[in-house]
Structure formats: structure tokens, C-alpha cells
Image: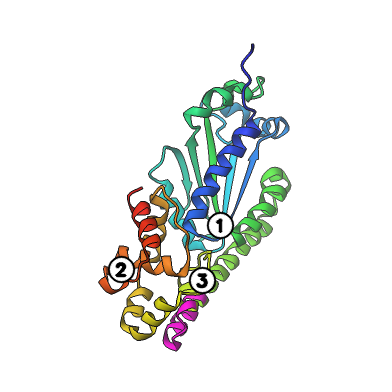
Amino acid sequence: MEKRHRTLEEISGIMKAEMEAVLKKSGVMHHLFARVKSPESIRHKMGLKGEKYRSGAARIQDILGFRIVFYFPDDVDIMADHLSFMDILDSSVDKPDVCTFSPKRLNLTMRIPEEFAEDFRAGLPQEYARYIDDAYEIQLRTVYSEGWHEVEHDLRYKCKEDWIGYEKYSRTLNGVIATLETAEYSMMAIFNELAEKNLQDGNFRAMIRNRLRLRITTEDFSPSIKEFLIRHPDIVKEIFYSDRMVFILTLLNHEEPIPLSYDNIIFLLNRIFLKNGDISALESPEAKAKLESFFHS
């Protein structure tokens, strides 16, 4: 009986689910999108850049595409750092240019996992298969830049000839992304300042939520943790100044997920940064077992 190959859509769905599981354990606020490039889209791309592909100078590497849209710009940098240790074939990472309005691209080209390689080749449109690499693309964006890129891609990138002679408008469109980037960093600054005010006011639950900006699974601390924090403002200040990037990368770099309750966040921060025995003593047997499993994964 002839072997049934998984379709490109099925491969994309499995890979998306695996990426979502990784993102979920980090707690970062995001949306994940996936798409399979249609034959019509491939045909359009060949029309734009066909000579480069036919000559062998390059190969199409984005038949499968994933876009991770983050709420905050620092999460883009965190995820880029995490992915930098994977099998990256190519990357397009633009550095800000102080003299030019232009969007920042953060696109990573990755090798198709070995388990999908045969099915991937079998699912390609045979007319174009020889021009296509065994690769997929991950784009990292923020919410505001995602909206801008959607408009720019459909109304400028796909019809560049319509913009010839209208450079003023093209530059103005690029200026919009500069405004959006300023808004993103202003929004992040608001939450950081709010978290500092929460610290000063003794509102430690809000401080954790606004300082870390993660999806948290519970409504509040347990009574014992809440009482401890009230009695130890100096330790709360140490918690406040813990490195958010290191914390999230720790969540990403361990295989075992751990529920991000307010209590578990304190226990994790303590084990990563504070090493405080009094906090460790507050770990229940169940919490201790989960933490041990997490750090050994």
C-alpha cells in the first residue's frame, strides 16, 4: 500500500502546536500565526524574483511561514535570543538607522525538522519544487508593527511599480512605523513605572503583574506568601529588580513547563536570583516537586 504523506497544512499545524507549547510555558503575551504559501503566491514570487531562483543564486525558503506577534518589543528580543541557539540557516535582522525611517525586520530561516523532511518534499507543487529549499521562516513582530507590515505588504511590497515616482509618500509610510515604535516603548515604560509605584504602595500582586507582563494563572498570592512579602519589604525590592529577560529565558530553556501562579513566580525568582532560605521554606511539598522537576528538565 502506498505510503500516505502528511500535507503541508498538516506539517504546519503540528509545528504551530509545538511552537505554541513553548511560548505558553514562557508566559509571554503573544499571538501565533501560521500559513502555507499557495501555488498562486509562489507563482507571484517567481514573477518578481524568478531569475534569481532559476539561476540557482537563491532558493525559496518560506513555503511554511510562522509569525509570532508580541505585545511588547522586549519580548521580541528575548525570543530572538532563545531561537539563536537553534538550526538557523539565515536571518534578516535590521539595526535601527537614525537617519532613515524604515521598519525593523526580524526574520529567521530555519531548517525543516528531519521528521517532516520527506513529507515536506512530497507536498511541494512539483512545478516549483526544484526552486524550494527544505526550510521555513519565523517572523517576530510586535502588535503595532504587525499591523503596519500587513498594510505595507499588501499595498506596497506586492505592487512596487505603483510607488515609482511617489517617494515622498513611501517615506511618509515608513514614518508611520517610527511613530508606532515610539508608542510601543512608551507603553512599556508606563508598565515599568506603574510597577515601581505598586512597589512603593505595597501592592505586590500588581507589582509582579506589571513588572513581568506575563500570563499568570492565579488571582493572588497564597496567605503565607502574602504575609511574608508584607513583612519583608527589602526582599520584595530584590524581587522587583530581578532580571526579567533572564527569568523568561529560564522558562524557555527548560523542557518541563511550570504553572505561572503568583506563588510559583516567587519560588522561581528565589531559586534563580535570591537564594533565600526563608522563601524556600514556604514551598509546599507539591510546589517543591514541581520546581525540582522543572529545573532538572
Q: Position of residue 80 (x, y in %)?
A: 44, 51
- Disc assigned to residue 188: 3
> In which quarter of the view is residue 169 placed?
bottom right
Relative to the observer, which residue lies in front, 117 or 178?
117
Residue at (39% x, 85% y) in the render: 230
Q: Are marks 3 and 2 in contact (CB under 8 Å)?
A: no
Q: Which residue is labeled 2 in the image? A: 280
Of labels 3 and 1, earlier in sequence is: 1
Name the dominant secondary structure of the magenta segment: helix
Q: Is residue 205 left or right of residue 125?
A: left
- Does 198 lie within the magenta span? yes
Between 153 and 267, the residue placed more toward the observer is: 267
Closer to the eye: label 3 or 1 = 3
Amino acid bearing label 1:
Ser
Where does label 1 land, which residue?
102
In the displayed structure image, the side of residue 32 where residue 201 appears, left or right? left
Q: Which residue range is magenta in the image?
A: 191-205
Quadrant into which the N terminus falls: top right
